[in-house]
Image (tube, coloured by chain):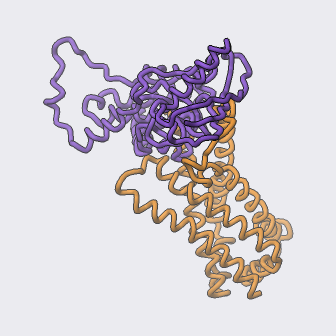
Chain colours: A purple, B orange
Amino acid sequence: MMNLTLKIWRQKGPHDKGQMVDYKVTDISEHMSFLEMIDVLNEQLVTKDEDPVAFDHDCREGICGMCSMYINGEAHGPDRGITTCQLHMRMFNDGDTITIEPFRAAAFPVIKDLVVDRMAFERIQQAGGYIGVNTSGNTQDANAIPISKHAADEAMDAATCIGCGACVATCKNSSAMLFVAAKVSQYALLPQGQVEAADRVMNMVAQMDAEGFGNCTNTGACEVECPKGISLENIARMNREYLKASSKG
Amino acid sequence: MSGLLSSSLAKKYAMALSAFFLIFFLLMHVTINLLSVFSEDAFNVASHFMGTNPVIQFAMQPVLIFGVIFHFVMGFVLEIKNKKAQGVKYFKDNGAANSTWMSRNMIYSGLAILAFIILHFIDFWIPELKYKYVEVLPEDPTRYFHELQEKFVSIWRVGAYVIAFVFLALHLLHGFNSAFQSMGLNNKYTKGFKKCANAYSILIPALFIFIALFHHFNH
């Protein structure tokens, strides 16, 4: 069992200044998930008639991309290839002080405590992250379209992006290029995505810029912190796609 | 095309292309400087050619100056934009866990290089302009080697040059490979290029340091 000091960002609402607040939690099992540890803290706070810490979560199995905490200076905490909900308390030691902050970026404004508004990602997706196919009975069977194993694998790897925003949170420039590149790549690699490829990359990048994300300086931090291991090769592919699309006018 | 010119990706391409241009210039510069180690005459001939050839003086030199200024201005513009995009800073941020010091501090290594370029201009470029266009002294094809040696007498100047070239190496170690990535070159075929880029990033500044030390101890 562990006793811990938590330094948590508390912010009453979007317009509140916010501040780090210290809490003590006791008898934390190493087998607990990080979010269960926060649940324990919140039970303590509710018992004391205090406002519980607001945080995003849904599936708690690393699929939905909702949980979004910056733990001890890293997106999703010190472990690799996981989301916050998959982080376990065995990664920490008795007596540790753990800092917990929301994902930071001007394009991800804090709603309350550790909850941030990531609708910017939705708007980027709406700008072109789809395939406009007529599905009224005459769609070609996808299994009948020959696709190389390599392209299929790369497209599937890109498609594993869950849009959690860890790439933005960890980037010193708050750049969203890994997210946008993953979405561009998953379609650019497949024949179904070719028809709208040029419009897709131009529109998604334009929306990314309009949302106020920073510029990528290729530090590679996003790739390291991404819970799904989305590769920087996707950003290079997006750069090529954009150049190709621009040259077409 | 208008979208290309105003987008964040266009700025990446522009930074990468100007970086490739400056990287090529460094290779040319160090090659001529190395001549001074092996032959006084060869260095004087090369320097005189570079200093008097009208194509180099009135076509290539303005392009080089534009490239340098563009790279610095664009670097600062992107830094300001990126700072704005960050919003509130983290209470605790462990950048060392996921990225190199060089990649996170390009602006500071760039500022160190900018300070060096100002010193370099004061040392070589401004005296050259004064010689040719203010005092209008007669051409002397043998003066370059001695002017070079004279500059490296002071240990303080040599120290400043060495520190600046260490920063140049740090800047190149991230910047060269980053330029490949920005231009979309990241696949199994480019891994060899990246190793060459790392070797270049260490070798070229090391040669500049060697030349400065060589002339300091042999003047």
Q: Is residue A36 above or below residue B128?
A: above
Q: Identify which residue, A231 or A62, lies in the foreground.
A: A62
Residue A167: tell me if it is visible: no
Residue at point 41% right, 41% down?
A229
Residue situated furthest right in the rendering? B135
Res A212 quadrant in image? top right
Q: Position of residue B160 (x, y in %)?
A: 77, 68
Q: Position of residue A162 (x, y in %)?
A: 41, 29
Res B150 quadrant in image? bottom right
Residue at point 63% right, 37% down?
A98
Q: Position of residue A175 (x, y in %)?
A: 55, 36
Residue at point 63% right, 35% down?
A4
Q: Is residue A25 above or below residue B185?
A: above
Quarter of the picture holding the C terminus of chain B: bottom right
Q: Position of residue A24 (x, y in %)?
A: 67, 30
Q: Is residue A60 above or below residue A148?
A: above
Q: Identify which residue, A142 or B185, lies in the foreground.
A: A142
Q: In the visual, does B22 lie left or right of A246?
A: right
Residue B163: tell me if it is visible: yes
Res B209 quadrant in image? bottom right
